[in-house]
Image (cartoon, rainbow, N blue to C red):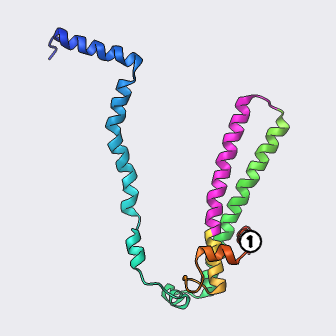
Amino acid sequence: MNEKQTPSGRLRKGAWWAANIVLPLSDARYTASKIPAALNQFRRPRAVLPSTKTAESLPELSFDEAIAASGMSVETLAGIYLRRKRFYLVLFYLAIALVCLLLATGMLAQVTTPEFWLRMATMCIFLLSAAALVFVSALITGWRLWQLRNRRLSPPERGVFTDFIADSRWLADTLSFR
């Protein structure tokens, strides 16, 4: 098992270790062996998500057909979406309030170290990112409410997202609890 290495083998191994001091050869080898596994990680969600071909092949329903297919009334759906929107808005305003509270606390603490402000900035960026994600969910539910209230769904009925942005006060409607 413990055979002696030949002089050329020892020379090659020594050259490898010497080159590793200057060049990141072992890191490059490790990365090259892990890239295919990382690419597979990026391919996995595509298998789960529905393809756009199947979405395009679905028949386009009018508003009344879609409501009938859902099995619920317009009022029931509007109530569900309104509760969902209010939940998202509470989370959104809570994240914004935490950012304001964090900044006010930082100002009142009168700490001037860069590490403190770096941590504060990191926490604020994290909270603002969370608020943005929740705002997008509230925007989507606001769009669905707008579709229900205006009885619009399909492109011929002018019920797509771009119509929502163009025909409504989308920001004020999204940020309100009604």
Residue 47 sits above or below residue 63 on the image:
above
Which residue lies at the image location 59% right of the left edge and 81% below the top edge? 159
In the displayed structure image, the side of residue 140 where residue 99 appears, left or right: right
Quadrant location of the N terminus in the rendered image: top left
Q: Which residue lies furthest to the top in this view?
A: 7
Quadrant location of the C terminus in the rendered image: bottom right
Corner quadrant of residue 75: bottom right
Residue 128 covered by magenta stretch:
yes
Give the dominant element type of the magenta stretch: helix, strand or loop.
helix
Q: Where is residue 104 in the image (x, y as percent from the top left)?
A: 82, 44
Corner quadrant of residue 51: bottom left
- Pick the front one: 23 or 65: 23
Regarding residue 81, the answer to whether it shows in the image is no
Which residue lies at the image location 40% right of the left edge and 16% below the top edge? 21
- Pick the front one: 66 or 19: 19
In the displayed structure image, the side of residue 87 where residue 36 appears, left or right: left
In the displayed structure image, the side of residue 10 where residue 172 appears, left or right: right
Residue 97 sits above or below residue 123 on the image:
below
Q: Position of residue 83 (x, y in %)?
A: 66, 73
Q: Is mark 1 on a helix, strand or loop?
A: loop
Residue behind mark 1: 177
Where are the magenta residues, as a range?
111-139
- The amino acid at mark 1 is Phe
Which residue lies at the image location 66% right of the left edge and 72% below the top edge? 165
Which residue lies at the image location 51% right of the left edge and 86% below the top edge? 66
Regarding residue 38, the answer to whether it shows in the image is yes
Q: Where is residue 138 in the image (x, y as percent from the top left)?
A: 65, 67
Q: Where is residue 5 in the image (x, y as percent from the top left)?
A: 17, 12
